[in-house]
Image (tube, grey):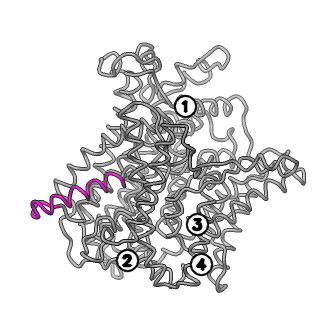
Amino acid sequence: MDGAEKSSTAKMAVPPVRNRGVTWRSVLIALVLIPLNCIWVVQVEIVHYSGHPTCLSIFSNAVFCLFLLVLANLVVRKVKPAWALSQGEMLTSYIMLSLGCSVAAHDMMQMLIPTIPHAYWFATPENRWEALIQPFLPPWLVVSDHHAMKGYYEGGTSILRPSNYGPWLVPLFWWGTFILALVFVMQCINVVMRRQWTENEKLTYPLTQLPVEMTRRDGASGLYVNRLFWIGFAAAAALDIYNGLAFLYPVMPMAKVKLTDLSPHFTAAPWNAIGWTPASYYPFIVGLSFFLPTDVSFSCWFFYLFRKTEQVLAAATGWGGLAGAPFLVEQSWGAWMAFAGLAMWSARRHLRRAWLTVWGMAGGYDDGREPMRYKWAFAGVAGGLAYLTWFWVRAGGSWVAMLSYLLLYYALFTAVTKMRAEIGPPTHELGSMATTRMIVEGVGTRVLGRGALIGYAFLWFNNRMVRSHQMPIQLEGFKMAEKSGTDYKLLGAAMMLAILAGLLSGYWALLGDAYGDKGARGVGFAGETFNQLQNWLQTPQDPNPLGIAFTLGGAGFALLLGAARMHITNWPFHPAGYALGMVFGLDYVWMPILIAWAIKVVVLRYGGLRTHAAMIPLVCGVILGEFVVGSFWSSLSVILERPMYNFWIF
């Protein structure tokens, strides 16, 4: 990001005194909202399979609830000013709500719960799971009771019956400890890295701008008294109101902003190798992408088209017939590992000082205002890794295989977390780039053994896609705490409480729906888990030399892009665009990113910094208008138990 763009994202000054952002009121509000929103998210994402708010970097349902909270707070401020919530309190509730929803989301609980009984209910003579898989499954991590499974898969009963919930208690307890430890290690890593990324590198955290602006109270300079904000809000809201009515009354033509596949226009070889190529025009994605630096937004859509070009060239040259070609996932994985290495390298002096702080040596930091002391953060990382490794050793796996997985897993999400803090993409879905898959491709299945492969299969629920992830939300939470003067330490405890609340709410939302309605949803995701495991066990895989080569090539190319960006003025290519563009995920949003890039280039070139800054309220209005009206239709679909218009994806 150049100097002009950095200046244009008007950041608030850091308050010198910590306020009371984490209070009993803000925590209580979050604890009330988390179960309601988890039920909402489960209903739209797994029951209706529509909308998918947690597939975005910033959850639309959480922003909607924050908007309602702000409106309610305005009323309270008029009636009883002393009772009004502070900005820190509202942001605390928002951060906790986002974290709670991330646990019940598409990429965690919605995939884990169906996995727990799947190997027993779907075992057949043809797949031979009874002999191939079942004897080696840890009984404390699965449900095998026929009565409990029958109610879960067929519905028409109640989860409150002891015979239904009883067999789930032990597996859910242990899986809960695993998830809490997994997320706690993320928080400890964020504690260690927060000062480096926020104060030393001064990353801009674009995704925090909307909730912070929504909760500010600046009189005449506030967001809600800005005319451009309401113009953007009204335009986006009107679009979604119209499309919502058009959905209910098909005689009205729908305003086409969602996915339109362009691939039918490319029928001749080798052009038909481009595959599914959707064009979309989501206004809120255009708005979110407006906050991206222009080199990032350009790189995102450029490398998406570059990926399509690779597919066409592979087909034209005969590489398309080679399994895995052109190795797009491997290229992206290499780029992300390069990012992780660069993040650690750039932080090497900071990490040294943090380590000196642990031992009370000269040259360390004063870590008294950090979310936790560095010695406890380092101890939390070590203790969490030890527990997670022990968990899978007890389950029959190898400690080497599990620790290797954890180190690569946290390396990937450290890179993703820093990337979000630096550029804030509207989504970062890294399709099929599972850490487990990359390990198997790198070393093969023979060296891993059955226990490790079973563990890797079960971990599919948390590394299949990289979307609704807790680690970036935690770091952005610390940034919002800084902007609002909220106490870091109290917020850290509140965030872990939100994870626990989301865990319990996710259990209830998914199991209660399955038993009480028509049976389990998300069975297909669990099928991916065990079909992959069956394939690993029956057809051993050797290491993939070409895949390894393209992984190294992706890492090298990302490093070259980064080096060129540092040494060549106005270099247009950002390595994050390459990493994001090589895999499925940008398909949904490449066109809105292109539109936002074009608008921003024109604004900066002909209007300058002042015009760019003046447009920020308009952009916030567009985003919030779609989130509010879109969330209204989404919540109405849950209340009325019928499909409604979805403003995002399907």
Label 4 vs label 3: CA separation?
30 Å
> In the rendering, at what x and y percent does residue 90 appear?
25, 59
User: Which of the marked residues, 1 or 4, is nearer the chain's N terminus?
Assistant: 1
Q: Main secondary structure of the magenta part?
A: helix
Residue lying at 53% horizontally and 51% vertically, measured from the top left: 466
Q: For mark 4, what is the residue?
A: 602
Q: Nearer the viewer, mark 2 or mark 3?
A: 2
Q: Nearer the viewer, mark 4 or mark 3?
A: 4
User: Which of the marked residues, 2 or 3, is nearer the chain's N terminus?
Assistant: 2
Please report contact status of discs 2 and 3: CB closer than 8 Å, yes or no: no
Label 1 vs label 4: CA separation?
47 Å
Residue stretch in magenta:
63-84
User: Which of the marked residues, 1 or 3, is nearer the chain's N terminus?
Assistant: 3
Residue lying at 25% horizontally and 46% vertically, measured from the top left: 31
Label 2 vs label 3: CA separation?
26 Å
Q: Nearer the viewer, residue 136 or 154?
A: 154
Q: Nearer the viewer, mark 1 or mark 3?
A: 1
Say what amino acid the circle numbered 4 marks. Answer: Val
Quick check: 420 above or below 65? Answer: below
Crowding near the residue tagged with mark 4, few <14, some 14–19, many ≥20 C-alpha atoms within 10 Å:
few
Could you tell me which secondary element the residue under label 2 belongs to?
A: loop
Q: Quadrant of the N terminus?
A: bottom right
The answer to whether residue 510 shows anywhere in this view is yes
Label 2 vs label 1: CA separation?
44 Å
Please report contact status of discs 2 and 1: CB closer than 8 Å, yes or no: no
User: Which of the marked residues, 2 or 4, is nearer the chain's N terminus?
Assistant: 2
Please report contact status of discs 1 and 3: CB closer than 8 Å, yes or no: no
Crowding near the residue tagged with mark 3, few <14, some 14–19, many ≥20 C-alpha atoms within 10 Å:
many
Say what amino acid the circle numbered 2 marks. Answer: Lys
Residue 11: which disc?
2
Crowding near the residue tagged with mark 1, few <14, some 14–19, many ≥20 C-alpha atoms within 10 Å:
many
User: Which of the marked residues, 2 or 1, is nearer the chain's N terminus?
Assistant: 2
